[in-house]
Image (cartoon, helix red, strand yellow):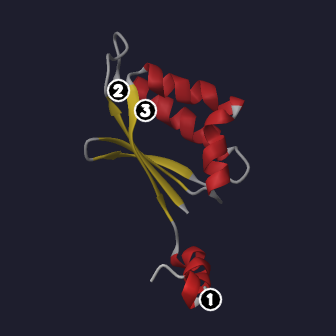
Amino acid sequence: MLRITTWRVSGATAPNLTPQAGVQAFNDMCTALEKLPGAGRVRWFFGSGGVVTVGEPESYAVADAILSTTSVQVPIAKVLALGYSIIEDQFLLEPAKVFPFIEAQGAVPAQLSRN
């Protein structure tokens, strides 16, 4: 699974904000996220229209638990304090993780199928 999140400055920025402050905040956030069990590799990039983080969580449950985990709340808060907001959050699944659901759909009795 991939989690692709686009961040943009959407509000008032911190006074005297330097590019180095943003770089450090995203580095710290990604480092903290990678320490969570099941979070996988987390990287950030400059993308079109903002900063993009790409994570490889094991599951939706891990992805959802990230924001409620105390050890990452401070690094995420630092990014938010710089004026960044999440503009878009996407989850991408590998075909092998989707195929069991597709195959299970074929096993539904015809009278219960939506087709």
Q: Nearer the viewer, residue 61 or 56?
A: 61
Q: Nearer the viewer, residue 44 or 13?
A: 13
Q: Quadrant of residue 13?
A: top left
CB contact under 8 Å: marks 3 and 2: yes
- Amino acid type of the residue tagged 1 in the rendering: Ala
Farthest residue to the right: give it. 37
* Tag 1 residue: 107
Left or right of 112 in this view: 14: left
- Amino acid type of the residue tagged 2 in the rendering: Pro
Left or right of 38 in this view: 93: left
In the image, which disc is placed on residue 23? Answer: 3
The image position of residue 71, as x and y in percent, is: 69, 31
* Residue at figure coordinates x 61%, y 55% from the top left: 60
Left or right of 65 in this view: 114: left
| Mark 1 secondary-structure assignment | loop
The image position of residue 44, as x and y in percent, is: 45, 45
Q: Is residue 85 above or below residue 36?
A: above
The image position of residue 6, as x and y in percent, is: 38, 44
Give the mark nearest the N terminus, 2 or 1.
2
| Mark 3 secondary-structure assignment | helix
* Tag 2 residue: 19
Give the mark nearest the N terminus, 1 or 3.
3
